[in-house]
Amino acid sequence: MRNWVKPQIFSWLLPAATAVLLLSAPAQAARLEYWRFDTAQNRLHFTTAGGVQPKAQLIANPTRLVIDLPGTTLDRSTVTQPVGSPGFESIRVGQFESDTARLVIELSPGYTLDPQQVQFRGITPTEWTVDLPTPQRIGTASSGSAVAASPAQSGSGVQIENVQVTPDGFFIRTRGGQPQVKMERNSDRSLYVDIPGATISPNMGSRDQLFDRHGVARMSVRPLEGSDPGVRVTFVLSDTNSNWQVTASNLGGVVVLPSPQGPRVGSGSVAMAQNPSSDRMVTIEGIELQQDGSQLLIQSNQPFTYTSEWDRTSGAYRIVIPSAQLGNGVQPPQSTNRGAFLWVKLQQEDPQTVAILVQPAAGVRIGPLTQPSPQLLSVTLQRPGNVAAAPNSRTSVPTAPAPMNYPAPSPMRSRDGRRVVVIDAGHGGRDPGAVGIGGLQEKGVVMDISNQVARLLEQNGVQVVMTRQDDREIDLAPRVQLANRVNADIFVSIHANAIDMSRPDVNGIETYYYSSGQRLAQTIHNSLLQGTGARDRRVRQARFYVLRHTSMPAVLLEVGFVTGAEDAPRLANAAYRTQLAQAIVQGILQYLQNP
């Protein structure tokens, strides 16, 4: 694909300065349709209907990057969303002039960035990305000019995301490269794990936790004291007889394990822990599904450790076993009709690392991972008995209606005789989506609705594949790739809308399609209006990424405004979200009768 890139010029601008043109060719009439800030890459992505040539300026006091799109309009009023990435505060999108849309990236107080490192890339004349450098803290030089913090001040780039309990110890999840780690047993009651140069993520929840697990009573996360930057994770021990091993993973993160054998780390000493399996190679001898489909069992020839997480590239659950190799002839189990997973893949990632990827089926969650023995790992596959609800509202709303009599779907073309529907719950993880009245977050609302839609469709004989099953961040491309890979019949992306908080009068349901999804959009939209009595904000055509790149009829539902005086309390109520889910299912099944 041709890259539409032209030379760009950046310059520092004081508040009274004029704009510096980055791309000066005249723009044609266009409409801003989509924008998203990727916190993992510090990247702004936006698309328009009609070609644009952006202009940009960097303004100080406070520092913000302003991107103007001449000849471009916006279908909504100004929207401000928090970014949640270190150094960045928010992104504001609005209509600057009658023919100019404006995107403003606000930096956190005390931060600035190097304009020479801001990079625009035109994927097409209607699709752009803006890569931003990591913001630096502003220091005050003797001349009064702004200077960036020194590398020593800015740290190593490693961030502490959270601390998790694993079946055999603890896992300190990090982001931004492989951490350096030091361990110190300062007394019989405290274990210090120091990560020099690291910082604590602003997205981290509680920095103090009570565990009572693996001989640990509680844990705290604090910046290192003194002039050297870094983070100290303190484990207060309830079992003083165990020794401890700490390993920095080359995949990011720190593994902390109790070790009943080996020399004890004395008071005041510092040691780098070694992987307990580093002196021997584990062989993975088999992986099989229990007959009732509730567990995957991974068998090895000797004890092993592991880490696990959701893989953002494939959307699958990923289990990594270090110092390991796959045995001869080991094959993954095969999915069965209405099974607990779509596929399992085994990978020898390098000569000493085995990765196992599990893609759960719709409605199936990865439950606890346990080790019944040091040579056996059990992965629980569970179907939840109920759906997690978003925060409840005190506002009175109608109770959930009785179950609806859904039309039976017509015969389908998938291999097991069922139609395949992909349900895409928008946003997730560090991307909350729209944030509205009372802090109501889009990602929680749509996850609840999506889970209910999936469960109801499965009950009516439709096979459902979900792009995400929990609160995790997934880029747009993997969502589309999953839908195309499973050869879905339709793709339904569920979102909640937002507008400026000063416009609580704006409420209602919108439904979007791009090309082949018009009848699907109209069918679901009508069902939503009939099932909820919400305001009608019409069916519209749009160039959203997930609509343009899917190979099947696709729609994007905006089920209400989290900023709306009418919609927000309804969306915050579990009974109303059930109404929405039932109405969406009614529309999908009506469409599947005559696709």
Image: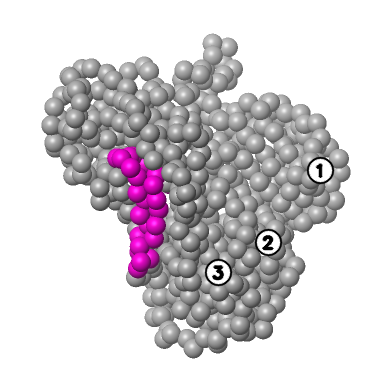
Q: Quadrant location of residue 275?
A: top left
State the residue position of label 3.
559
Label 3 or label 1, whichever lies nearer to me, is 1
Which structural element holds mark 1?
Answer: loop
Nearer to the camera, 18 or 316:
316
Callout 2 amino acid: Thr
Looking at the rendered image, the disc whose residue lies closer to the viewer, 2 or 3, is 2
The numbered mark, 3 or 1, whose residue comes first in the sequence reads 1
Q: Position of residue 302 (x, y in %)?
A: 31, 40
> Is label 2 in contact with label 3 (beta carbons under 8 Å)?
no
Label 2, secondary structure: give it.
loop
Q: Earlier in the sequence, mark 1 or mark 2?
A: 1
250 up-or-down from 162: above or below? above
Against 337, is 212 above or below?
Answer: above
CA distance for labels 2 and 3: 21 Å
The colour scheme of the drawn protein is one colour
Circle 2 residue? 550
Q: Which residues are magenta?
A: 284-310
